[in-house]
Structure formats: C-alpha cells, structure tokens
Image (cartoon, rainbow, N blue to C red):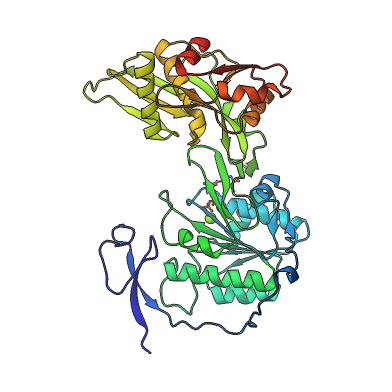
C-alpha cells in the first residue's frame, strides 16, 4: 500500500487530508504540516489479557525512588514511581536540563544506574554543566544520540534504573519519515519510551519544550500518554522557578515546588514566603501582603499598586501583572462604587511582586487595600497580612483553608490579620498566640480598620 500523506496540525494534532492555511479545529494559522501516515502495525507480541475477578486483583504497591531534592519528590507525590514515565515541559532556557542533570546526579550518587540521553548537547557540554552542578561520577552514563532505535538499544544494554531523554523534540524514529519534532515523531518517541519504561520497570523522564502559549508540537499532545506531567515555569528575568504537577497518576496534582536558579544550579527554596517577601519595601504606600494558597501550601506574597494621574484622559491605563486582568478591573470598580473614589483621571498599575501569578479570589481584599493605600498615600501597617474574597456589593466572603493561611503569616512574624468575618468563628477555636485576627464584613469596614 502506498503511504498516504496527511496534514497534521502541530498545535492540536488535528488531521486533514488536504492542506489548510488555518486549522479548522484550533483556529491557529500555518500549523498544518504534511506527514506520512504510517500503516498501523499493531504489535500483538505482548500476551493477551484475561478478565480477572475484582477481589483477586493484587493490591497495587507503588515502590518509589526518592532523590535528595525533597521538593522534587514532593511534586512527584513522594518520589518517582518505578517504571513510570514523567514528562517535564517548560520553555527553552528555563532550566529543564539543569534540573534533570541534578536529579540524575542524586540518583547516581545513591547507587542507582542512570542513563541520560541528550539529543541537544554534546557530551562535553553536558559535562561542563555537570561539573558546575557537582556531579561526581557514580553510575551516571551519558549518551549523545538522536535516533530512537539506537537509544532504546543502548538502554536495553545498560538497563538503567533511571532513563532521561532530553528532549522529545530532538529524537526521531527511523520508522517514520517525518522530521524530528513533528506530532507523529514526538508521539512515537513518547509511546516507545513509555513501553520501554513499563516492560523493563525503568523510571523514565522525557523533557519537552513548550512555548509561552503552551503549544508547539507535542508536549500538549503527549499528556494523555504519560503517567505524570510536570511543568517547569518562571520568568527569565527572575531567578525563581516553579515546578508543579499538571497530571499525576500516582499522586496529587496540587503540589508545587519553588527553586532558585543560582550559580551552582537549582536550589530548592524551603521557605517560599520569606523568599518572596525579602525585598518588600518598609512603610511604602500601595504595598500589601496577602496570604494565598499555591498548590496545597500557603504562600505570602506582596501585591503592589501604583496610581498616578493619566496623560490619556479619555482612556486611562489599567495594567495588572500577575493578577487576572478582568478581576482586577472588577475590584477597582467596586472600590469606586462602594468607597466613593473616582479613578477616571488615573492610570492604575497592579503588580504581584517577584513575578508570581496568583489567580485566587482570596487575594481580592489585598488588591483593594493596595489600591486604597496608594490612593490615600498611607502605608498599610507593617506586620499586617490579609486575605478574603470580595463580592460585587463590596461584601467580604469567607475563603477556604483559612487556618494554613493564618499559620503561615504567624510563622513569618506577622501580628495582625485582616480576614473575612465568616472565617473567624472556625479560627477562634485554634490556639494562635501572638496574632490579632480582625474579621471584616465589607470593604468599607476593612479600609476603616486598616487606615
Ligand atoms: P537549561 O537547563 O539549559 O534550560 P533548558 O534545558 O530548559 O533549555 O538552563 C539554562 C539556563 O540556566 C542558562 O541560561 C544558564 C542557567 N544556569 C545557571 O544559571 N546556573 C547553573 O548552574 C546552570 C547549569 C545553568
Ligand atoms: Mg535543555
């Protein structure tokens, strides 16, 4: 049979028999690339399965291997499950290779055999980085190779406990005609590595590049094929990186770890709140500390606001960085309506310090207090933290996980917490010495009590 050409959207995987300028599934332009449709040679080499009675199924024990980087274990749900396939996605240059080389170093130093395959860098380049990261031998094997069949043959020979493939976009199978990085190739690579991992009980990591929009050939289209998807995010001009699980067949997806890129590689930050607050200006108007929840953990961050008279009288600026734009606009409208301020001649800038993104409604009250503090040119008392969701009539609604939020603030030495009245009742039973809890019902009451 003559191989059939298909056009595959490199953004969403949509297939079309003819070329289209615009993908009719996801609407992206110029994403369809011609690939050869391979014949489906299903492999019947593995034994057929039999139905089993529910009660006869053995309990699934998930043996895991841990590394020294405790934060990394946590995100995986307590270490990497033996024989699982983990996909780590992130923008180019964010530190994926660095992280996995550090992880490989740790596995190797605890007598695990590791095979680190790179299709991007030469062995010398990897060694140069490894020396900076303090790699000291152990059973860490490096392989510079881009051909999938050769990689798997080597892996079969060495039979490591850990396999790292850096990156899925640079590896190609000679069974397919399309070039590396196309949807069919990355799927083939992921699929074959997955089968290798399962049949040999080798814990495997696949690195995948993704762009800011989260698209580009592949990692997105691989999510359903792997056991765990981790995302490594951060801003290039900030040193911190956030690692979080997007999918985890063996653990929670809410865990997140924060690392700092330093000269000696990535350093886990064990106290993220202190890290994000360390450069907070003292006694400045427009700065408020909020207690938010990131993943499963509380995190204290600073929200800043700047209000200045506009040059664009008909269309003043509304900018927010790290916050939901529409929600911020809504909160400013509530301040105008309920507190009687007018922003019509003002440019308003809101910012989450440190380049973090927080989407939680529990930061509403913090945003409002930051704006009002700036308007009044009066700093919020230092030692004060806040959280609470704000509704359209200015009412302050209670939020989940109030106790961990309060405890985090207490552990960093904050003395006063402005929080929803509705959350107070539950907290009063708790033993929280040295902290004053101030419950508020609406934003009028909140601003009166703060200023
Ligand atoms: P890298 O791991 O190569 O990114 P990725 O694999 O995601 O493309 O990391 C690249 C950046 O990290 C690079 O700009 C240099 C920086 N870096 C450090 O700051 N310190 C270090 O010790 C290392 C190894 C890298
Ligand atoms: Mg890399």
Q: Position of residue 361 (x, y in %)?
A: 48, 32
The residue sitting at the left extreme is 314
The residue sitting at the right extreme is 111
Residue occupying image coordinates x 48% and y 36%: 359
Residue occupying image coordinates x 54% and y 73%: 148
**In the displayed structure, does residue 223 sit left or right of residue 433?**
left
The foreground one among 164 and 348 is: 348
Q: Is residue 120 visible?
A: no
Q: Position of residue 107 (x, y in %)?
A: 72, 57
**In the displayed structure, does residue 186 sit left or right of residue 198?**
left
Q: Position of residue 153 (x, y in %)?
A: 62, 77
Image quadrant in which you'd find residue 125:
bottom right
Q: Is residue 324 above or below residue 225?
A: above
Image quadrant in which you'd find residue 438:
top right
The foreground one among 348 and 362 is: 362
Tag count: 0
Image quadrant in which you'd find residue 202:
bottom right
The quarter of the picture where the N terminus appears is bottom left
Residue occupying image coordinates x 70% and y 47%: 69
Q: Position of residue 350 (x, y in %)?
A: 41, 26
Q: Is residue 216 visible?
A: yes
**In the displayed structure, does residue 47 sit left or right of residue 386?**
right
Q: Is residue 63 above or below residue 94?
A: below
């Amino acid at each position: 049979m003559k191989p059939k050409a298909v056009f595959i959207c490199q953004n969403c995987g949509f297939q079309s028999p003819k070329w289209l300028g615009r993908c009719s599934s996801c609407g992206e332009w110029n994403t369809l690339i011609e690939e050869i449709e391979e014949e489906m040679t299903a492999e019947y080499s593995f034994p057929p399965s039999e139905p089993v009675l529910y009660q006869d199924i053995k309990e699934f024990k998930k043996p895991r291997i841990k590394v020294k980087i405790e934060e990394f274990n946590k995100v995986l749900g307590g270490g990497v499950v033996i024989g699982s396939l983990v996909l780590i996605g992130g923008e180019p240059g964010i530190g994926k290779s660095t992280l996995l080389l550090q992880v490989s170093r740790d596995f190797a130093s605890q007598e695990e055999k590791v095979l680190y395959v790179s299709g991007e860098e030469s062995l010398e380049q990897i060694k140069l980085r490894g020396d900076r990261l303090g790699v000291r031998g152990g059973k860490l094997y490096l392989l510079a190779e881009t051909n999938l069949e050769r990689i798997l043959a080597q892996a079969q020979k060495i039979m490591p406990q850990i396999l790292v493939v850096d990156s899925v976009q640079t590896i190609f199978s000679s069974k397919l005609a399309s070039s590396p990085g196309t949807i069919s190739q990355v799927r083939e690579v992921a699929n074959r590595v997955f089968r290798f991992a399962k049949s040999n009980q080798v814990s495997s990591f696949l690195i995948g590049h993704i762009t800011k929009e989260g698209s580009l050939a592949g990692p997105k289209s691989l999510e359903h094929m792997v056991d765990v998807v981790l995302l490594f995010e951060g801003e290039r001009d900030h040193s911190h990186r956030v690692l979080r699980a997007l999918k985890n067949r063996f653990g929670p997806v809410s865990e997140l770890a924060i690392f700092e890129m330093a000269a000696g590689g990535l350093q886990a930050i064990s106290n993220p709140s202190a890290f994000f607050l360390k450069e907070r200006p003292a006694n400045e108007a427009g700065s408020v500390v909020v207690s938010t929840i990131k993943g499963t953990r509380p995190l204290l961050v600073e929200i800043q606001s700047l209000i200045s008279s506009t040059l664009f009288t008909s269309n003043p600026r509304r900018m927010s960085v790290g916050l939901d734009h529409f929600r911020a606009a809504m909160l400013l409208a509530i301040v105008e309506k309920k507190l009687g301020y007018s922003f019509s001649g003002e440019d308003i800038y809101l910012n989450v310090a440190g380049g973090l993104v927080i989407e939680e409604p529990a930061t509403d009250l913090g945003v409002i207090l930051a704006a009002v503090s700036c308007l009044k040119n009066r700093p919020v008392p230092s030692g004060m933290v806040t959280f609470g969701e704000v509704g359209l009539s200015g009412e302050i609604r209670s939020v989940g996980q109030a106790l961990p939020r309060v405890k985090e603030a207490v552990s960093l030495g904050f003395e006063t917490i402005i929080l929803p009245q509705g959350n107070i009742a539950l907290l009063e039973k708790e033993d929280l010495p040295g902290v004053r809890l101030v419950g508020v019902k609406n934003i009028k009451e909140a601003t009166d009590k703060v200023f």
